[in-house]
Amino acid sequence: MQPAGPAKFVDVSRMLTVSDAVLQGKILRGGMGTGMPEFGSLYTEDQMWALVGYIRGFVFHK
Ligand code: HEM
């Protein structure tokens, strides 16, 4: 099921079940059919995984 709005990176139950590959995939390709844009060519490989790690940190800053 698609979440209704932008992702809630502070949602612990979501963030515990979503894989790095899914987070990376959505940054790359966007959430098809949602408002989430695709950032495919914007980031280098290193920046992409740094961003995934950064997003994971939000859960600790509620
Ligand atoms: C640097 C900017 C952004 C980053 C890094 C980012 C990252 C992400 C990630 C990783 C997800 C997947 C979350 C998950 O599956 O649990 C997501 C989902 C989503 N984002 Fe973004 N996002 C950005 C900007 C935006 C903008 C500008 C919008 C809308 C105007 C947006 C709307 C959404 C929506 C609607 C979803 C849910 C779509 C889905 O689950 O398929 N995002 N975002």
Image: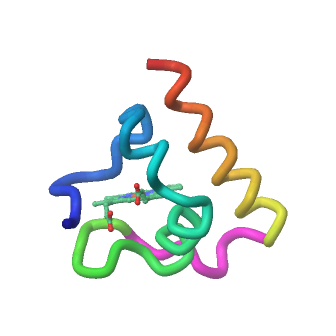
Seen at 57% across and 43% down, the residue is 55
The secondary structure that most of the magenta stretch takes on is loop
Q: Quadrant of ligand 1?
A: bottom left
**The N terminus: image quadrant:** bottom left
Seen at 35% across and 66% down, the residue is 36
The location of residue 14, given as percent across then percent down, is 38, 45
Looking at the picture, tell me which residue is in the foreground, 56 or 32. Answer: 56
Check the image and report above or below for 14 versus 42: above
Seen at 48% across and 80% down, the residue is 29
Q: Give the range drawn in magenta.
A: 37-44
Q: How many numbered circles does the render carry?
A: 0
In the picture as drawn, the residue positioned furthest to the right comes out as 46
Colouring mode (rainbow / by chain / secondary structure / one colour): rainbow
Whether residue 40 is in magenta: the answer is yes
For residue 12, side relative to residue 41 (left or right): left
Seen at 16% across and 56% down, the residue is 4
Check the image and report above or below for 6 versus 45: above
The location of residue 9, given as percent across then percent down, is 43, 40
The location of residue 61, given as percent across then percent down, is 52, 19
**The C terminus: image quadrant:** top left
The location of residue 26, given as percent across then percent down, is 47, 70
In the picture as drawn, the residue positioned furthest to the left comes out as 4
For residue 54, side relative to residue 38 (left or right): right
Quadrant hosting residue 3: bottom left
